[in-house]
Image (cartoon, helix red, strand yellow):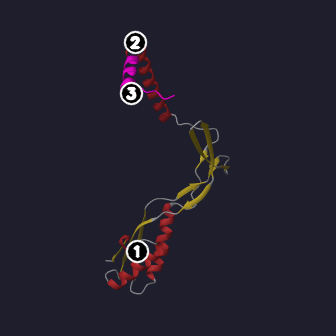
Amino acid sequence: MVSNMKASDYLKKGQELLRHPKAKNILIILALLGAALIFLSDVMPFKSKSAVTQPKAGVSAESFEKELESKLSAMICSISGVGEAKVMITLESGVEYVFANEEKSNTNYTADGSRTDEKSNTEKKLILVDGQNGNKEALVQTELQPKVKGVVIVCEGGDNPTVQQRLIQVVTTALDISSKRVCVTRLS
């Protein structure tokens, strides 16, 4: 049954409750208890009996970056007119993991006369597997490699517009980035 009370009626009821001598004490105790729980959750983090660990990174962002720089440097040095070259790559983020989830969905229908209510609950839960050291680990569904943010190439032929254009073309094609993210300059 829906009540026809207005917001002002609820406000009046709340003020009446606060006038009660014990109500203020109860509110103060609840506020202190809440603050204590927040403090304890920071000081003593919850640990389950079987800890869930993140998977060991197959490739770290740094090693991915270094390997990519090495491959790109070798490719760049083979282009006519480049000469000696140094390559620096920056990444937007590290390696990202998408974990496998188990999804349960419940839909309940109730009907009474002319009114129909539909309730839908969806619950997602990580799929856990036994790890090497006995801990539970989340099952990795996909490993997303880092995205390249920018590339700087410093080379002997970096002041030649033709060489610059070739380098930008090679880098944008190889790394699938825009030319705005590539800087080519002359090695001094």
* Crowdedness near tag 2: few (<14), some (14–19) or many (≥20) residues, C-alpha within 10 Å: few
Of all residues, the one furthest to the front in this rendering is 114
Q: Is the magenta stretch mostly helix, strand or loop?
A: helix
The C terminus is located in which quarter? bottom left
Between marks 3 and 1, how big is the CA–CA gap? 72 Å
Amino acid bearing label 1: Lys
Q: Which residue is drawn at 45% across and 59% down?
A: 93
Q: Is residue 22 above or below residue 1?
A: above
Q: Which of marks 3 and 1 is nearer the N terminus?
A: 3
Query: Residue 85's spot in the image, x, y percent?
Result: 40, 77
Amino acid bearing label 2: Pro
Q: Residue at x 43, y 61 (%)?
A: 92
Q: Residue 21 carries which label?
A: 2
Pick the front one: 39 or 142? 142
Is 149 positioned to the left or the right of 117 in the image? left
Q: What element carries label 2?
A: helix
Between marks 2 and 1, how big is the CA–CA gap? 76 Å
Front tag of 3 and 2: 3
Which span is picked out in magenta? 1-18
Q: Is residue 46 visible?
A: yes
Q: Which of marks 2 and 1 is nearer the N terminus?
A: 2
Q: Which residue is drawn at 49% across and 61% down?
A: 61
Query: Residue 51's spot in the image, x, y percent?
Result: 61, 43
Q: Do the residues labelled 2 and 1 touch (CB within 8 Å)?
A: no
Q: Which mark is residue 6?
A: 3
Q: Mark 1 points at which residue?
A: 86
Q: Is residue 103 above or below residue 24?
A: below
